[in-house]
Amino acid sequence: MLQRRGWLGGPKPPKNPHSLEHLKYLHHVLTKNQTVTESNKSLIVEALRSMAEILIWGDQNDSSVFEFYLEKNMFLFFLNILEQNSGNYVCVQLLQTLNILFENLQHETSLYYLLSNNHINEVICHKFDFSDEEVMAYYISFLKTLSLRLNEHTIHFFYNEHTDDFALYTEAIKFFNHPESMVRIAVRTLTLNVYKGKNINDGAMLRFIRDKTAAPYFSNLVWFIAEHVREVDNCVHNNANHQHRDRLRDLVAEHLDHMHYLNDIVTLENELLNEVLIHHLLQRLFLPLYVRSLADGAPGDDTDCPFVSSVVALFLLSQVFLILHHKPLVHQLAEVIFNRNLDSLSLNGEGTPVEQADILQQPESLEKLLSSTKKGKKHKRRPNYRNIDDERSSPEVEAITSLDVLPKGAASGLVDKVLLFLSDKPDVQLNNSFIDSSPKSSTTPADRIKTRPFLDTIYSALNCTGNDYSALFALCFLYAILHNKGISTELKKIVELGLVGEDEGCESYCHWLIERLLRIVSKSVKPENKVRLATLRLTSILLKKVGVRDNQCVLLDEHLASVERCRAEGMQNLQKFLKEEEMFLDIFEDEYRLLQSKPLNVEYLMMDSSLLLPPTVTPLTGIEFSKRLPCGPTEQARQLIGIFFTLRDLSLFLCKESETQLPLTREQDCIQTNDKLDLNNSDLIACTVSSKESKQRRFLVVELYQLILVEPDSKRLGWGVVKFAGFLQDVEVSSDTDDSRTLHVIIHKPSGLRRVPILAANFIFDDHIRILRCMAAKQRLTKGRMRARHLKTGRIAVLLGLP
Amino acid sequence: MSYAYLFKYIIIGDTGVGKSCLLLQFTDKRFQPVHDLTIGVEFGARMITIDGRQIKLQIWDTAGQESFRSITRSYYRGAAGALLVYDITRRDTFNHLTTWLEDARQHSSSNMVIMLIGNKSDLEARREVKKEEGEAFAREHGLIFMETSAKTAANVEEAFINTAKEIYEKIQEGVFDINNEQFLSSYAVLIHPCNSLK
């Protein structure tokens, strides 16, 4: 309405909003309304909005539009509006207009027009009201959109080589730890788009990033990850009753996000930058916190300790090695874990001592660090967190405001505690639970490991004393190392072959490791065992990996014999359940299907934060069966069945035999829909199959294992075409109380525990002896079901070695 | 402006299916869809009313960032709803739905509401994917389904609002429990009660 009337008697807006005239009109409106007031606010907002529309139309249809825009230097209107601090309503529109422009312009020249005169950087540096979530969201989207347009030509509009200014990047990273996840994601996207810039091939820009921003940004990033990791640790220790599982899940997911972000950066192979990042990661995060905690991990109640418990460290390191495969990083990290001791950690790459306390020392805020690189420059506009509304004091917001440097006293207090803690600690290196009872495994590796406290922690976790809580992580860790592409085969050999030393090559595999793995296996088949299925499966995967080389099993006979012994023991345990457990067949087949369709994926396994909580029995936690212990006899049967399959598979694999007995029914042996059958000698019962969807005439055939519905084959006499086939073992049949010629038939999907019907229908028999037919059919189905189940149970008995 | 809840959405699907246009069409009605102009945007917010309560929707387009695993991962986790979009005139965009859906299910909260959208329903003559196929896919995977056109604005409003209704129902049913602080922590980023009533 307002638009049509024009403004203060000025020209009316042209009828066609997509024309040069319309831009001229907007120019007029904005010229007349240089000052934003309450009364002209809406008009200005509408003018800014239409501007986006007309400029994009011009970009696609009429070059004179952009020429006019440039001639009148219309970007100045935007800046003028910003200068006035005209309120968030107008700012949001302005940012949206810019967003739309940079998202939609197709012609490079139009883009250059918009970017020229350094105006864009003024908008980037403008101090918006970031406490308004909407302004924040539009602003960060604006920066992200710009970063998507970076290329070798546009980079010069953003990065000024002479003044060493790259506002787009430096302003964005100040929000790297913003409480709002979408904002953090946008910042990460932007940084990745910039680092990808090696394609832009602007050496000066990359040098700027490395020399002026990399250290500040990465030191802050790494520090916050460390803080985060300590939070994970806290949450684990205050969570013995699983009451904060959602919180823990989020924290662990966030750690994974961090690791994936780091991986996304290093895989861009921007070597200049990676060097700095890897240095920070190793020297300020992975070595002093993760690795150090392996040996020094506090029991958890010591809140002053800068480290996390060794179990949490092991869990996090497994994630690191599962996700990051960048050679220069993972190799160094693995090298320290495998070959070094605590002394080596006090030295950094250059041989200067690194204070453990350093990891608690928060780096200067990005705000400060970035501005100090530009001494003598005036920075009147810069967004920062301090204008975030302080009243909203969620914990996240507090974390943000602490981007500002800690008060001096507070920081030094922490440092003192750390020093105290360190001096308290007895010589950890000798503190090892590493006494091998088995005489077979030579003591030499054990001796050597004494000087390898980190490896010691991992290997002693494999002892699986009490429960398998930390053993599972140790297994994951070894798995991750062996599958990591960035770790040299030499280091992997330490795992595979034992420690390489003077007697190198004497042993074809690491007896010591194999014996630990076998011990887990043998524990799993003991009554009252505390080994979860996931642990056993992973143990089996590792045994396969270490025990088989070049397609040859390299295990000693006695080790193979031990596998067989455990397998036999597992079978024996299972035998009694075959008779006692009513649902045995269903559970058996269901477990098998599950194992085939969802083989253990270690990466997914390690995404599950519930593993960090003490292993539990109760299904009420919602924890997947394989990640907890069985509850009640039925689940015990299920557990034993799972063990049976795992060990059977392991044994067959090591003996290079293939599975011939499982599954009990192979799909290729079954009758399928659309098969054509010769039914000349079969019993056929005619009936009408009536379900919700349809009503059809069919012939019912009861085979050995299957119920089949056919219709006559029009081409061959006596043959039928299969319209439906289901397993008799899954049939439920009942008579209709009112109608003696009708049977209710339900056939469940073969997935045992979840009862989903694949067919639910009434079978109606209506020939002259229909009642008899109906009874015959019922009997045949009931008997067929029993026979099918009996036959299969018999085959299981054979598998379990029962007579 | 005050609101009772804030829902965050993401839009996913192959490039060129019209995600950013849908987004702009929904969040800013002042942009009238016109024949010779295609405009889209990567972010937008809008207030809607469900059950007499003000709800703010924030919609984030994830275009151009698919190559970074860390980014897709976190996007999924931060959203209460997702619009999975394909182009009814391009069979390949429909064929890729399974991959998108796997990704979404892998990374998102199991409660995330996903709506399947067949976009460009105005281009009937060039249709390659039947409406029934979209419906069948949605049924099979438990999604809500709708065909839309960012060009004519057909069903755009409904697509976004129905998704919001579904989320709102989940809150009412207690699936998203916003009062239980322990549970809230995980969804605090998705839904938070308004604390800025003015």
Image (cartoon, rainbow, N blue to C red):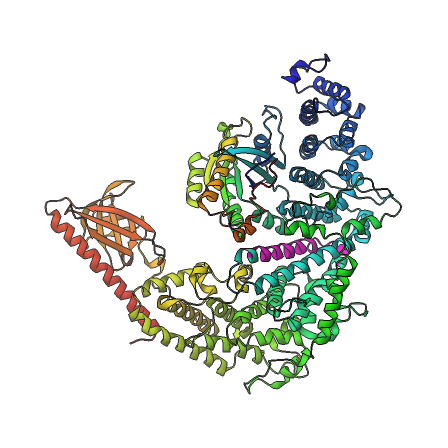
The residue nearer to you, when weighing A235 against A720, is: A235
- Residue A612: image location, x then y, percent: 55, 64
Would residue A226 be seen by someone viewing this image from the given angle? yes
Q: Quadrant of the C terminus of chain A?
A: bottom left
Residue B10 visible within the image: no
Is residue A44 in the magenta section?
Answer: no
- Is B178 displayed left or right of A33 in the figure? left
Outermost residue on the bottom side: it is A439
Compared with residue A100, is residue A488 higher up or lower down, i.e. above or below? below
Counting from the top left corner in percent of width and height, residue B112 is at 51, 46
Name the spot of residue A28 as percent of width and height, x first. 75, 18
Looking at the image, the residue that sits furthest to the right is A376
Judged by its main secondary structure, the magenta piece is helix
Q: Is residue A56 left or right of residue A353?
A: left
| Residue A802 image point, x, y percent | 31, 75
- Say how many tags the image has: 0
Check residue A254 for magenta coloring: yes
Residue at 47% x, 69% y is: A532
Q: Which residues are magenta?
A: A249-274
The residue positioned farthest toward the top in the image shown: A9
* Foreground residue among A720 and A673: A673
Question: The N terminus of chain A is located in which quarter?
Answer: top right
